[in-house]
Image: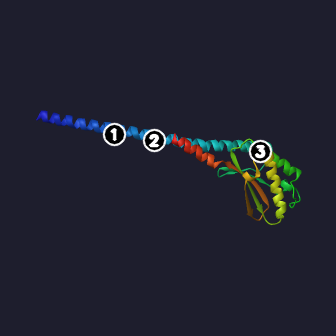
Amino acid sequence: ELQAANATLLKNLKIFTEASSRRSESIGATLESLREKEARLKVINDEFAKGDSIALLMVTDFKNSLGEGAQIKVGQGMLALPISQDILVGDDENADSLSIKGREYVLKVAQVLKKYPSWELMLITQDNGMIDKENRDAQISAILGIIDQETGIPAWQIKQNKLDGLINALEIRLHPNYADFYRTIRKRMKN
């Protein structure tokens, strides 16, 4: 009976050892899988952090260039620089060209944009119908011309969006190049 009990005990011990070994291998595989997923998440997190860091640098550069009083909106992964009609064209909202102050302002903006060629640029205009369409188009062309001359970004590459609204406003929006962002993440995820 003792020999049978020992044999059963040894058999159970062997089964327990095998099960424990399988669990250890399973836990090891799970840990390795978690490490791989953590590395992938780190890549995504690093890319987001990189974009946030660049945005912070841009805010600092715009504040240094345009002055501490410059309006800069930050949110939803982008920067927005509202430009008032007063700065842009002075007292005559219907002017077909930029004021000296407006040209200098857009030139300063373009000089900062030149430092961040990987970010995409969008020009948003909001018209309330008080400015002649031809004059507004001339103002926009002047802005695009200055940006093109300073940064080398051709006007056709700058996305434009016109909104109807209650105010006359113009805004330059900047955001990371999302196509490059996703390409970088996909490339790193495959490796």
Looking at the picture, how far across and down is residue 130, in whole percent? 83, 66
Estimate the spatial distance between the alpha carbons at disc 2 and disc 3, rounded to whole Å: 44 Å
x, y percentage for residue 152?
A: 77, 45
Q: Are marks 1 and 2 in contact (CB under 8 Å)?
A: no
Badge 3 is on which residue?
Answer: 151
Which amino acid is tagged 3?
Thr
Which quadrant of the view contains residue 170?
bottom right
Work out which residue is located at the far bottom of the displayed protein and give it.
129
Determine which residue is flagged by label 1.
23
* Residue lying at 73% horizontally and 42% vertically, measured from the top left: 60
- Left or right: 24, with 53 as reference point: left
Instruction: Estimate the x, y position of residue 69 in percent, counting from the top left.
Output: 79, 48
Secondary structure under tag 2 reads helix
Residue 125 shown left or right of residue 23 in the figure:
right
**What residue do we see at 84% from left, 64% from top?**
132
Q: Which numbered disc, 2 or 3, marks the residue that appears first in the sequence?
A: 2
Distance from disc 1 to disc 2, alpha carbons, whole Å, reads 16 Å
Q: Please name the residue that numbered disc 2 is placed on.
A: 34
1 or 2: tag closer to the N-terminus: 1
Q: Amino acid at mark 1?
A: Arg
Q: What is the spatial separation of the Cα atoms under label 1 and label 3, in whole angstroms?
A: 60 Å
Labels 1 and 3: the sequence-earlier one: 1
